[in-house]
Image: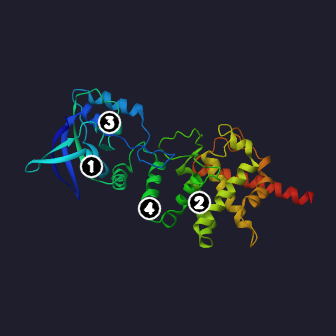
Amino acid sequence: MPTAIDCMVGESANRRVLLGFAPARLLHSLSFADVLDEDTGRGYQRRFNPQHSLDFRRYIQKPESSTIPLTFNLRPDAAAAWQLNCLHDRYVRLEIAEGDAKVLSQVDCQHRLGHLSDLSVELPFMCFIGLSEREEMEVFNVINSKARGLSSSLLDFHDAQLSADLGKDRPELFIALHLRHEPRSPWFRQLDLGGTSTSGLSRRASLRTLQKAVKHFLNGTRILSRRPIDEAAQIVLDFWAAVVTVLPEQWARPRKYLLTKGIGVYALMEIAGDIITEAADGQVLDRKYFAATLVDFATDFDWSTNGPLKGLGGEGGVKAAVGIIRDARARTRLKVVSNG
């Protein structure tokens, strides 16, 4: 027997939607959360937070509890599994074929429903009819762009998926994602997007951290006024490849060293800008050049969590860190000149 839920049909602004009520356990059994798979790039939801979901389970069973409607979508690619039958006026019956239970995509309710599979408490819901996955992601972004606890890196990833020309719209995000997706990059699959991953690789920093550091780099160097975005992205990749070449132990042990912590990422991108600004006209800005420049001072600098950058954070901390690193670099260069 198909599952049937009687609803009203209407408009939410310019989108056709269903409005209805159903037991939590039924809505749980009929729906799924399309969590971002960082390995494949499919999906868009944040990773599941069990504590958040359990908190809601405890709350919704209290005598005077309530909630705003859960939000779903009936995707067109699953249309063979569901149909709407008109009853009268604005009333319709949603019928879901037997064996095709999970046809409701959880646009905004995965944590509210996550631990309610056994509860009969009745909940209100609104369901979009026929949004594509891209349209669904756009709605999710509008609903959740200011949500507490939602990863800013996940929202950045959404922006990238929705942008028609990311290199023009958000060049810093274009470059950060290039570093994450390019197999030759030391950041390959090591930037946290806010989804889930089964790759087994340790994620060293967030996408938001790297793209904000890249934005400062772009503003400081004005490199995009002289070079195309693809070339700028390769230069940033080559810089980080040089960092790993010169400081392999510090890169390999992120718990002990600050290279991949926010303070290290921001400061090193500032140093990358310095190196590029100092380069002679016609200098090839590749990994070899960056490595030769970095090795003169970076190997003698204490990048550990107990070193001179210990305890620095925030915008003021970044400025202090950059100043400390620049001083160390200047002293090394003076030593080289005096020894020469």
Q: Position of residue 233 (x, y in %)?
A: 61, 61
Q: Quadrant of the N terminus?
A: top left
Is residue 117 placed above or below 249 in the rendered structure? above
**Residue beneath label 2, please?**
216
Determine the CA span between mark 4 and mark 2.
21 Å
Q: Position of residue 187 (x, y in %)?
A: 62, 49
Which of pointers 4 and 2 indicates the residue nearer the eye? 4
Instruction: Indicate which label's residue lies in the foreground, 3 or 4.
Output: 4
Q: Which residue is mark 4?
A: 163
Between 40 and 141, the one nearer to me in the picture: 40
SS state under label 2: helix
Residue 86 position within the rendered picture, expressed as x and y whole percent measured from the top left: 11, 49
- Given residues 139 and 35, the one toward you in this image is 35
Q: As drawn, which residue projects farthest toward the right? A: 340
Q: Horizontal placement of 258 versus 170: left or right? A: right
Tell me which corner region of the image, top left, top right, bottom left or bottom right, holds residue 294: bottom right
Relative to residue 154, is residue 140 drawn left or right?
left
